[in-house]
Image (spheres, helix red, strand yellow):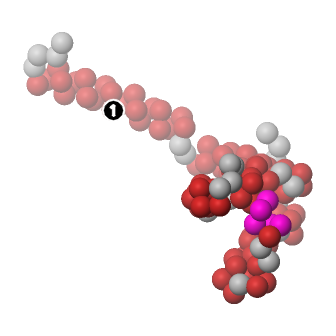
């Protein structure tokens, strides 16, 4: 049990020092680049394998699928995505057409070809 201000201060200082070590180990320039390389490799594999589930794990906006799941009565994110791909024509809706073009531009294989392939 800590009984004095000095002992409390020392305990906080020691805990802060331990946390700083953790930060240096887990966050930093080299670690950040390694994380990027792993995510890039995952994205390339998902595109090459046409793995919808993996694409949903990586793509921004996937949280919207949870809401759409309940609205559409689908049981999974994949069902929503498959249903949309089968039944919606993005060319029929201006905002979907714009989104479709943006997704194609950002996730096209051409955008990833020039980058190094780093496998896990």
User: Which residue is the extreme one toward the front?
Assistant: 73
Q: Which residue is mark 1?
A: 16
Rendering coords of residue 93 (x, y %): 71, 84
Magenta stretch in the rendered image:
82-86
Q: Quadrant of residue 70?
A: bottom right
Which residue shows up at 40% across the image and 28% down it?
A: 18
Rendering coords of residue 56 (x, y %): 71, 54
User: Which residue is the extreme one toward the left?
Assistant: 4
| Quadrant including the C terminus | top right
Q: Judge the density around disc 1: few (<14), some (14-19), many (≥20) Cα neighbours within 10 Å.
A: few
Rendering coords of residue 114 (x, y %): 85, 64
Which residue shows up at 73% across the image and 46% down it?
A: 38
Main secondary structure type of the part rendered in magenta: helix
Q: Nearer the viewer, residue 108 or 69?
A: 69
Q: Quadrant of residue 16?
A: top left
| Quadrant including the N terminus | top left
């Amino acid at each position: 049990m800590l009984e004095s201000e000095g002992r409390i201060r020392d305990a906080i200082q020691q805990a802060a020092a331990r946390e700083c070590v953790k930060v240096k180990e887990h966050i930093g320039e080299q670690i950040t680049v390694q994380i990027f390389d792993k995510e890039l490799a995952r994205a390339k594999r998902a595109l090459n394998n046409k793995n919808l589930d993996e694409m949903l794990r990586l793509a921004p906006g996937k949280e919207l699928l949870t809401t759409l799941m309940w609205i559409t009565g689908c049981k999974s994110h994949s069902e929503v995505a498959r249903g949309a791909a089968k039944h919606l024509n993005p060319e029929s809706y201006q905002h979907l057409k714009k989104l479709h073009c943006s997704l194609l531009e950002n996730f096209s294989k051409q955008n990833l070809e020039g980058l190094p392939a780093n496998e896990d």
